[in-house]
Image (tube, rainbow, N blue to C red):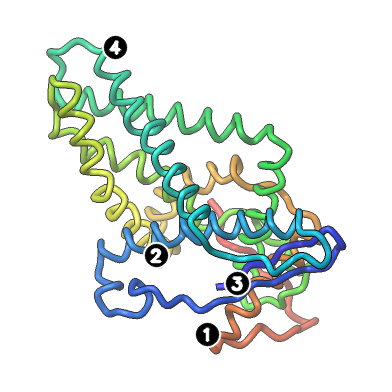
């Protein structure tokens, strides 16, 4: 894995490290449904550590000791973020549905209303944080990451001018994954309809790994079969939702995304696409 950060002096600082967790090195780590949970947890951890490290680089003074890219602060932040996400997007909608609906409704109806509340909270959350200048900047870097990956997968040269032509949407984006979680949860939660609020909350917490595992497998399948018309129809809402979590990046952001991608390709033994002035830029898959 590699992270590239623009330091206050304008230089790009890069951190690289091998991924040695069992999810990457053991055969069971690639088992269907198991791999989804492991990859989700790993991605959350790496993402939070990368943000913390970038903050350290931003405030680091000249001559200070080397920035550490690990530690209990990072994992505590991840745990707190997960608890907040579970409370906001699972426990709150479940509680609201319990108190808003009559008790004689069937499980599917309750789960559907709960899902609508959950989706509304999710959309409002994304829309609201998008007004924060720091988050808008993070979303722009998110867009730069997608553009770089789209350019690479289209076999195009990894230069800011070429990468800028590509879309900020990508089929394997975490935003699309979260939307899949919201929708799949409606179906998975429906049979577990308890009048007791405590039992209902416990059932939701226990089923989150199941929902996440199914959503991950759907994302893998859809990304591999995006050329099928019905798959493109299914992923269209997720691609559209990425407009809330990505912004058009500027050239320095594109340079950071490209700088982070290149060492990963090199470590995997993947050749970087060679420049070809005669080949027009390809168009990445969009809804």
Disc 4 crowd, CA 10 A, few/some/many (<14, 14-19, 20+): few
Closest to the observer, 264 or 166 = 264
- Residue under pointer 2: 225
The secondary structure type at the circle numbered 1 is: loop
Q: CB of mark 2 within 8 Å of CB of mark 4? A: no
Q: What is the distance, in whole Å, between disc 1 and disc 4 at their CAs?
A: 52 Å
Q: Which mark is residue 268?
A: 1
Q: In the rendered image, is residue 150 in sight? A: no
- Residue under pointer 3: 2
Q: What is the distance, in whole Å, between disc 2 and disc 3 at their CAs?
A: 28 Å
Q: Residue at x 81, y 59 (%)?
A: 61
Task: Name the image quarter holding residue 257.
Answer: bottom right
| Foreground disc of the pair 2, 1 | 1
The secondary structure type at the circle numbered 2 is: loop
Q: In the rendered image, is residue 160 in sight? A: yes
| 226 with respect to 101 (left or right) | right
How far from the left and from the top, in percent, is residue 41? 39, 57
214 shown above or below 101: below
The secondary structure type at the circle numbered 3 is: strand
Of mark 2 and mark 1, the one earlier in the sequence is 2
Q: CB of mark 2 within 8 Å of CB of mark 1? A: no
Disc 3 crowd, CA 10 A, few/some/many (<14, 14-19, 20+): some
How far from the left and from the top, in percent, is residue 258? 70, 70
Q: What is the distance, in whole Å, between disc 1 and disc 3 at their CAs?
A: 12 Å
| Foreground disc of the pair 3, 4 | 3
How far from the left and from the top, in percent, is residue 8? 83, 58
Task: Name the image quarter holding residue 91.
Answer: top left
Position of the N terminus by quadrant: bottom right
117 shown above or below 154: above
Q: Which mark is residue 100?
A: 4
Q: CB of mark 3 within 8 Å of CB of mark 4? A: no
């Amino acid at each position: 894995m590699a992270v590239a950060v623009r330091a206050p002096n304008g230089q790009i600082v890069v951190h690289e490290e091998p991924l040695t967790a069992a999810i990457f090195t053991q055969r069971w780590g690639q088992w269907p449904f198991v791999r989804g949970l492991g990859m989700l947890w790993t991605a959350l951890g790496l993402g939070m550590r990368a943000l913390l490290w970038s903050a350290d680089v931003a405030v680091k003074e000249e001559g200070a000791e080397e920035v550490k890219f690990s530690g209990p602060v990072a994992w505590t932040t991840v745990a707190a973020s997960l608890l907040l996400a579970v409370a906001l997007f699972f426990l709150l909608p479940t509680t609201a549905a319990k108190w808003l609906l009559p008790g004689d409704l069937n499980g599917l109806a309750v789960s559907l209303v709960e899902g609508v509340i959950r989706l509304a909270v999710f959309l409002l959350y994304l829309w609201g944080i998008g007004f924060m200048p720091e988050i808008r900047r993070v979303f722009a870097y998110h867009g730069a990451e997608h553009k770089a990956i789209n350019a690479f997968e289209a076999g195009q040269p990894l230069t800011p001018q070429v990468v800028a032509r590509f879309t900020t949407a990508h089929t394997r984006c975490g935003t699309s994954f979260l939307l899949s979680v919201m929708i799949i949860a409606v179906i998975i939660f429906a049979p577990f309809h308890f009048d007791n609020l405590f039992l209902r909350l416990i059932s939701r917490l226990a089923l989150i790994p199941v929902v996440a595992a199914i959503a991950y497998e759907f994302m893998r399948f859809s990304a591999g079969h995006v050329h099928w018309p019905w798959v493109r129809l299914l992923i269209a809402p997720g691609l559209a939702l990425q407009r809330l979590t990505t912004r058009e990046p500027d050239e320095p952001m594109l340079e950071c995304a490209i700088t982070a991608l290149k060492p990963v390709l090199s470590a995997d033994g993947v050749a970087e696409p060679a420049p070809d002035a005669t080949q027009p830029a390809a168009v990445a898959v969009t809804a």
